[in-house]
């Protein structure tokens, strides 16, 4: 049975073969793959920014809610960040503190959230555009859990029948996890957050979902940036100049789709080069964590304001 991950993989390979502004340096794949860390070297979940207490229902709810609002990278320079926290970890820490202090939201509570409510949780201004987007995403989560899964996050995992790809496929149908672009008139699904939610459920120890190895990389802006800095992705000089100048890319524009798709396909090639010892999801995590290094932070990364990543 075809999963959403299969569709992402095929579409990204198709884009990579036709890309005009981004190219994968295939000669760099083998040596780069050989230098990747082993899976066990990846850092554990940080209890300072991720809710690890409470019962299983609340912890599943935290993962789904956090990944439903795991976007906004194009807005990070405009939010109030906590000291020594990136944009993502600023938002994650606020959500974690809310779950620690008051427990998880019920589905009914989620459906009533406003931009002001989310702003209070994340310590941001209620007029910031992300707050309305976050509130809309969380309201959709509440409605889908209430209407499709009997009001229980645990029932969502039951519906996935133990498969990471099945959970990602279920989430991909929600407005909260929407992530579909097009390229040369062909639909290009990415579903970064639907897939990462399945991996995060495993990483948090909330289930042992099989088929995690079938997930693709989680297409955002940081992994393409790391692969560019490391020479795996080669950019057209005009595109590189725009990124280096801090120009926002238009979500869904050809070059933005190419960056995401070529990164996903490059990670597939890297996984193949390790004989699948490392899955695309594991490679993605290693590259994402690498992106926190000063070498990568000192170079402007591609940014686009959207609700996909």
Image: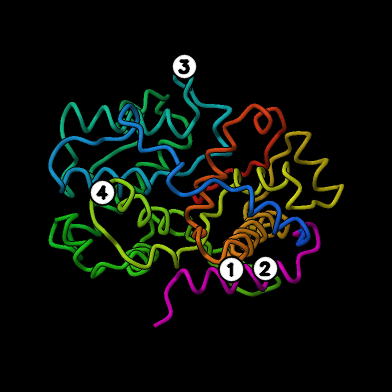
Could you tell me how far apart the alpha carbons at marks 4 and 2 are, in whole angstroms?
Answer: 37 Å
Q: Is residue 58 left or right of residue 67?
A: left
Q: Label 4 belongs to which residue?
A: 205
Q: Label 3 belongs to which residue?
A: 83
Could you tell me how far apart the alpha carbons at marks 2 and 1 are, in whole angstroms?
Answer: 7 Å
SS category of the residue bearing label 3: loop
For residue 178, what is the image quadrant?
bottom left
Could you tell me how far apart the alpha carbons at marks 2 and 3 are, in whole angstroms?
Answer: 39 Å
Sequence order check: which comes first, mark 3 or mark 4? 3
Furthest toward the bottom, the residue is 1
Q: Is residue 156 magenta?
A: no
Tell us which disc is closer to us: 3 or 4.
4
Check disc 1: other Cα within 10 Å, few if <14, some if 14-19, many if 20+. many
Could you tell me how far apart the alpha carbons at marks 3 and 4 are, in whole angstroms?
Answer: 28 Å
Along the viewing direction, whichever of 220 and 245 lies nearer the viewer: 220
Residue 219 position within the rendered picture, expressed as x and y whole percent measured from the top left: 55, 54
Dominant SS of magenta comes to: helix
Quarter of the figure that contains the N terminus: bottom left
Q: Which mark is residue 183?
A: 2
């Amino acid at each position: 049975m075809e999963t959403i991950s299969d569709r992402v993989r095929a579409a990204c390979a198709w884009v990579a073969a036709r890309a005009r502004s981004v190219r994968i340096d295939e000669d760099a794949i083998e040596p780069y793959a050989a230098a990747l860390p082993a899976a066990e070297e990846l850092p554990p979940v940080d209890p300072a920014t991720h809710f690890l207490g409470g019962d299983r229902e609340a912890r599943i709810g935290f993962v789904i809610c956090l990944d439903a609002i795991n976007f906004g990278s194009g807005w990070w320079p405009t939010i109030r960040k906590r000291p020594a926290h990136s944009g993502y970890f600023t938002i994650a820490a606020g959500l974690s503190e809310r779950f620690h202090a008051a427990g998880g939201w019920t589905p009914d509570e989620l459906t009533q959230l406003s931009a002001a409510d989310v702003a209070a949780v994340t310590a941001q201004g209620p007029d910031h555009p992300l707050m309305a987007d976050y509130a809309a995403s969380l309201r959709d989560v509440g409605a889908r859990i209430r209407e499709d899964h009997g009001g229980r996050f645990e029932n969502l995992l039951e519906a996935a029948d133990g498969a990471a790809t099945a959970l990602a496929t279920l989430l991909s149908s929600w407005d909260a996890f929407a992530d579909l672009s097009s390229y040369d008139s062909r639909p290009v699904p990415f579903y970064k957050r639907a897939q990462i939610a399945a991996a995060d459920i495993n990483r948090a120890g909330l289930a042992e979902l099989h088929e995690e190895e079938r997930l693709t990389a989680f297409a955002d802006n940081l992994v393409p940036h790391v692969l560019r800095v490391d020479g795996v992705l080669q950019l057209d000089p005009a595109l590189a100049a725009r990124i280096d100048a801090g120009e926002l890319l238009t979500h869904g524009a050809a070059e933005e789709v190419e960056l995401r798709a070529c990164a996903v396909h490059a990670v597939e090639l890297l996984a193949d080069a390790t004989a699948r010892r490392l899955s695309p999801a594991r490679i993605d995590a290693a590259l994402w964590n690498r992106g926190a290094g000063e070498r990568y932070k000192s170079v402007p990364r591609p940014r686009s304001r959207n609700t996909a990543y």
